[in-house]
Every structure is written in structure tokens, then in C-alpha cells.
Amino acid sequence: MATETAAGAAAGHAAPTASEYIVHHLGHFSTHHQEKIVDFSIINMDTLFWSVAMGIVGCFVMYMAARRATAGVPGRLQAFVEMVVEMVDDQAKSIVHGDRSFIAPLALTVFVWVALMNSLDFLPVDLFSSLFSVLGIEHVFPHHRVVPTADLNGTMGIALGVLVLMLYYNVKIKGAGGFIHELFAAPFGIWLAPFNLLLNIIEFAAKTVSLAMRLFGNMYAGELLFLLIALLGSTATVFGFVGHVIAGSMWAIFHILIVLLQAFIFMMLTLVYLGQAHEGH
């Protein structure tokens, strides 16, 4: 993994310190300066760009697999996609008891999309800063983060989408009147309506926030560890270089499990929450 040639170094300034290096890589290319981890008053353009890009890549891969699908012996891509589709469909059947014509494809989309966004964490941490420096446009992109799921704004956006679907299916399955009645009557009965409403609101909020925070926390920690390993490689010693290679390789291999596991967990929780919307208290 390459060490950073910081934007300031290209202009003749001293190399950044370890803290400056990490802060620089954790900054976003935004509509204006961001001082908070989550701030809905601005738009992180890098998160938006890579989220859309990975969505397009996921759609393209699935399209190519469907286009090349044959009834005979499947190729590697078709076999892999069929395995993923079967896995997601089996989980949807076991969790959601109702019409799955939209939910199963939704779960597949969530799994593929989140897995692709998580996989961007395998790119070298200094790839884009070095590229921008070579092209002489580092002043245009002073900050650039590649992993959308390491941005709480990104994961919270996906979680809010799941919340909208939870509310939609609650109304669709139970009817507007049935859903409102459930909000006030479950789980303690209509006589404790204020407490029931408060509890149900907290439940929906907790599901949304925990869904976003779980994915964000794991990917943010993984990104931060890659940065620390990159700093180890920047030391001008044989031990630093060897340690950088060994630690980077080991963490990258282990991170493959994290990338896929977090995508699977996000998909499963989406199915669980939508499955609960099909059931009454």
C-alpha cells in the first residue's frame, strides 16, 4: 500500500504528521467544509458519487449475468450470481410470509450494492490523493473518501430508505386504520395508548439508527485501521516496511469476511424489519 504524498508536499511543504495524515483522509469532498461526522445540511459529493457508481456496477453485473444465462452448464459468473440469488431468496422465504415479488429482489439489491460499496475499502488509501497530485488537481479535490458505507450520512440514507419501506408495508398489509390502531394499542392495550405510541416510535427510530450505525461503525473502523497500517509503511525502517506488508495483507484478507458479513447482516435486518411489518402484534 503506497504512502501518502500529501497535497502540501507537492507544493513544497513539509510532509504531514500522523494525525494530519489521518484527518486528511477522513475528510470528504463536500459542498462546504464539514466539521461533524454526520451533517445533513451538506452533501458529501464523494459518498454520493461512489454510491451511484457502485449501484451502476451492480446493475451492470446482474444484467450481464442475466443476458448470458443458459439452460446448460452455467459459466462462472452465472453460477456465482445463481448462488447469491438462491441464498437471498431462501432467506426471504424463511423470514417474510407474504408477497415477496418486490422484497426478494430488494434484498438482493441491498446485498450486492452494500457489498460493492464495502469492497471499495480494498483500494489503496493513497490511490486518489496520489493520482490527483500527479494530475495537478489536488487543490480541486483537497479531500476524497472512497467508501460510502464508512460515511454515516451514507448508511443513514440507506437506513431511512428501509424505514420508508417498513412504514409502507405496515400500511399496505394492515391498512392505514389497522396500522394506526397498532401504534396506539400494541403491545400493552389501548388503555395505555400514549405509552404504546411512544414505545413504537422509539422502536422504529432504534431500528433505523442501529441499522445505519452497525454498518458505519464496522466500515469506519476498518478504514481507520488501513490508514494506521499505511502509516506503519511510511516509516523509513525495514521493520516498518515488513510490518506494513504483513499487517496490510493479513487485515485485507480478514476484511474480506467483514465486507461480505456486513452486507449480509444489512440484508438480513432489512428482511427481518420488512417481515415484521407483515405480522401483527
Image (tube, grey):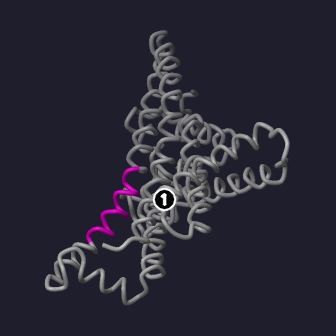
| Left-right relation of 182 to 215 | left
Query: Total label count?
Result: 1
| Left-right relation of 68 to 219 | right
Write down the residue under mark 1: 154
- Residue 9 in the image: state x and y as whole percent: 54, 35
Q: What's the residue at 60%, 55% (across, down)? A: 108
- Residue 67 in the image: state x and y as whole percent: 83, 53
Q: What's the residue at 22%, 72% (across, down)? A: 199
Q: Nearer the viewer, residue 271 or 48?
A: 271
Q: For residue 123, which quarter of the picture?
A: top right
For the C terminus, the quadrant is: bottom left
Could you say whether the residue bearing mark 1 is in a helix, strand or loop? helix
Badge 1: few (under 14), some or many (20 or more) residues near its Cα, within 10 Å? Answer: some
Prevailing SS of the magenta stretch: helix
| Residue type highlighted by circle 1 | Gly
Q: For residue 39, which quarter of the picture?
A: bottom left
Q: What's the residue at 50%, 34% (across, down)? A: 257
Looking at this view, name the residue that lies furthest to the bottom.
177
- Residue 228 in the image: state x and y as whole percent: 42, 30
For the N terminus, the quadrant is: top right
Looking at this view, name the residue that lies furthest to the top.
238
The relative height of residue 242 versus residue 112 in the rendered view (above or below) is above
Residue 210 included in the magenta stretch of the image: yes
Q: For residue 10, which quarter of the picture?
A: top right
Residue 35 included in the magenta stretch of the image: no
The relative height of residue 272 versus residue 256 in the rendered view (above or below) is below
- Residue 143 in the image: state x and y as whole percent: 52, 49
- Looking at the rendering, the stretch of residues picked out in magenta corresponds to 202-214
Q: What's the residue at 49%, 33% (across, down)? A: 255
Q: Nearer the viewer, residue 75 or 252?
A: 75
Q: Nearer the viewer, residue 202 or 7?
A: 202
